[in-house]
Image (spheres, coloured by chain):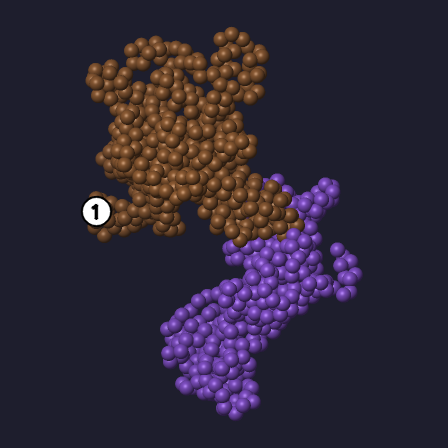
Amino acid sequence: MENGKECLMGRNLRLENLTKTFGTLTAVDHVNLEIEEGEFICFLGPSGCGKTTILRMITGFETVTEGKIIFDGKVINDLLPQKREFGIVFQSYALFPNMRVEENIAFGLKVRKMPKKMIAERVDQMLDLIGLRDWRNLYPAQLSGGQQQRVALVRALAPDPQVLLLDEPLSALDAKIRVRLRAEVKRLQQELKKTMIYVTHDQEEALSIADRVVVMETGQFRQVGKPIDIYKFPVSSFVADFVGTSNFFKGHRTDNCVNTGKRKFKVAQSGSIPEEEVFLAIRPEKIEVFKYGEPPAHLERSNLVPGRIDVVTFLGAAVRLVINMDGEEVISDVIEKDFEQRQLRQGEEALLYFPPEAFIIYRAREGSQ
Amino acid sequence: MTGMTLGFLLAVLTFFMLYPVYDICRLSFFKEGMFTLKNYAAYFTNPRIFRSLTNSVYVSLITMVITTVLAFFFAYGLTRTTIGGKEIFYTISTFPLIAPSIIQGLALILLFGRNGLITRYLFQTDWNIYGATGIVAAECLYCFPNALFILYTTLSAVDTRLDEAAQSLGASALKTFYKVTLPSAKYGIASAAALVFNLTITDFGVPVVIGGNYNVLATEIYQQVIGMQRFDLGATISVILLMPSVGAFLLNYYLTKKSYALISGQARPFLQPSRPFKRWAFTIYCWIPCILILIVFASVFLGSFVKTWPYDFSLTLKHFDFPSLGGYAPLWTKFWASILDGEWQSMIAYKYAPIWNSFWVAILVAIGGALLTLLAGYIVEKKKPRGDQVLYTLSVLPAAIPGTVMGLGYILAFNKPYYFFYGTFWIIIINIIICNFTLGVLSSIANLKQIDKSIEEASVSLGANPITTFTRVVFPLTKTAFFSNAIFFFMRAMTTISAVIFLVSAKVKLAAIEIIFLDIDGRTASANAMCTIIIVIVVGMLVAMRLITGKAGLKGMSASA
């Protein structure tokens, strides 16, 4: 495994115009993507966006309506699922309840008629990978959810699949374990340098785990990119809204000013078209909040707005404020230290500052930049 | 793979179910290739035969009302009150399923017959129970567990919080019952009623032993065919019997679906402790059917061991030496005949041959039936190929067809020289499997529904082919259901009468059928003894299965969908 880079070309997985329709419904709509060997790709989107359908087409459990799935230079549209050598991890674990942990892991090796001794070695190796050697003789029902999913993970990895596909593998687990297992999956991926395709509706999970994230909506790819780029530079109001939290203002842009009706914000970019309808998006952590009446002098006056702090929620290191600005609700995350120092209180007036460069501007009509 | 299995199952069901029924219809409507209603005219103009229809409907309706009401309050006691001994009540109420339906008839004759313990011995009266009264009483006991299963499921699934909500809003207990409990269980009640109607109108065993001169459709078919060799009239009566039974079946099926749709996933089966009066009332109430059932079994047991019921109660085993109803069983007869001689030889090797036959037939039916219904369920529930709905419909249909009709259909369809299996045990085995296909498939489907689709996909994605997936993953997971299906088929094979009575012969004999022949011959005590032996075998099998699989129980084994 250490010599995993011997193959220079790489066994890439390519989706070409991939389409799936169920009756009149188009679940996946002409999508294109090249996944490199060893890459960790995450499909992210709300439920019903088609991400699981793509995964199921790659696994072979769903037929392809149109387009091609190409692996290692060969079209595999019609290859039987059991011939694809792709490992799958399911949301429901799908461990065989009638088999012990080690039998579960050995299953894929046994059906490949691997010699007994090699199976035993491989099973040990896999159990060590997840630190469950002592649990090998238990049945799935005797394990916790997190342990079960670990077993499911190495069961899929045991036959050394070309690609590992994970279908919302952590969504049945509770929050703490989810975060821990997330890190474990990431570690395994980096150790084994295995191509992994991961489907989730949890944006935090997607951003923290993947090399590249594919944001999907209604069967189409809305944005493909590195997690940091997707968070910082969402290409549409949908992405901005779905990935992380954003505040939106609808307004009318003239030069580098946007008039939202109630107020005028100064923005950093000037538009190419003289006058147009736009959406302004701003992340909660970009908004600064001060006690009423004492803003630092150097700030842009027009981007200072008074408001009342309606709700205060402690998130640990940060404090989330819901602020009412003359009827408009804005969400702002303030680091805990600032919250204390600036003596912000629920129910009191405050002054909000929207830095001009923090706004992302979308054209209102198509909701994209 | 899937296509081949589907084709095979469709062919089996078409050939062994649709074809015989088609043959019956053909015979009743056609004479020498010409369409005619002559048979129907003959049926409706002969008052004695025509009475069988009104008689059937009459006893079925009365049985339906009594059984449904009795079973409803019994189920209510088990699900909605905090009485003690629920397990015992439940277990006793399932007893009628392990015996042939005639057992209730035999017991009632022992108690209320011409030489009944109660009628003759205690009250010295000439009144006896033969006729409609006997049929209704016996059928009520026989149908009780079947109705109970449906009502028990319904009542335990309906959200008890609705009752609590109604009471907290100030409704009295009685008002809550009428306005909330009863309406929420209405589909279950109606479906239980339809099932009881169907079971009663199609039953053959009870009316044949206790009906006396009171003829019903199921016995009339047998009379016409076996007694008078009037196959055309038998077929005509069969078609007439098909209508109410199919109607009741469809109604039951439709209502069961509706009733399950009402079941809320939120139901909380938490019960407040019942008030003492309610507890006592329901405890006493629940004992009544249980005691009646126990009396039935006790009388038949006792009746098979005493010298001359009800005059001489000294114990004897002589009734177990069945009077010259000898038969022949492959292997068995040869084996015992070679090592025994004299009286023992004739008893074990010949007279006990039907029991041995029944046992082996039941074993083969159990294996074959459980396998075929699991396969059919697997294809319908998991594979869903094109045509799966046809298979589903054909699989569910057998429950609608009365056994006597199926039996007659088999004679008409297969009594031809080129059907080598006719007149052998194989046709009996096939017939019993087909007649009980419905429940086997439905319980397989219910069980397979619980297996996550991903488990099979996991197996496939790990490289297993469909056969490995089925044998290594799906089958082990359905093992419990498979065994309980096997037990169900075994019990049905040991106890069934109505269809196979047309298929037995001097060479091919079965224990349950012998009960009827013994009874007709006036050998009531031996009939009881044969019944006892069947029960012992069935119970022995249940116990063995319980030891093997670690669990058993009769839950979900009724004739209900």
Residue B249 falls in image quadrant: top left
Horizontally, residue B473 falls left or right of residue B284, namely right
- Across and down, in percent, residue B355 comes to 48, 21
Task: Note the chain letter of the brown one.
Answer: B
Q: Is residue B299 above or below residue B438?
A: above
Q: Residue at x 56, y 46 (%)?
A: B7
Q: Name the residue tied to disc 1.
A: B175
Instruction: Label the purple chain with its letter.
Output: A
**In front of the other: B468 or A336:** B468
Residue A189 at x, y = what percent? Answer: 66, 59
Left or right of A271 in this view: A186: right
For this view, does B462 lie left or right of residue B97? right
Check the residue under mark 1 and report the chain it is in: B
Numbered disc 1: secondary structure: helix
Tell me which corner region of the image, top left, top right, bottom left or bottom right, holds residue B398. Answer: top left
Find residue B2 and report its horizontal and vertical position in percent.
Answer: 58, 48
Pinpoint residue B478: horizontal percent, then vertical percent.
53, 41
Instruction: Please tell me whether residue A150 is drawn above or below residue B193 in the rendered image.
Output: below
**Residue at point 63% right, 44% down?**
B468
Q: Amino acid at mark 1?
A: Lys
Residue B207 can be seen, yes or no: yes
Give the residue at x 46% y 70%: A320
Quarter of the image that includes the N terminus of chain A: bottom right
Q: Is residue B157 visible?
A: no
- Mark 1, other Cα within 10 Å: few <14 / some 14–19 / many ≥20: few
User: How many numbered marks are there?
Assistant: 1
Question: What's the residue at 37%, 45% (across, down)?
Answer: B250
Looking at the image, which is closer to me, B401 or B456?
B401
Q: Residue furthest top?
A: B342
Q: Is residue A163 above or below residue A342?
A: above
Q: Which of B437/B47 is in front?
A: B47
Image quarter in which the C terminus of chain A is found: bottom right
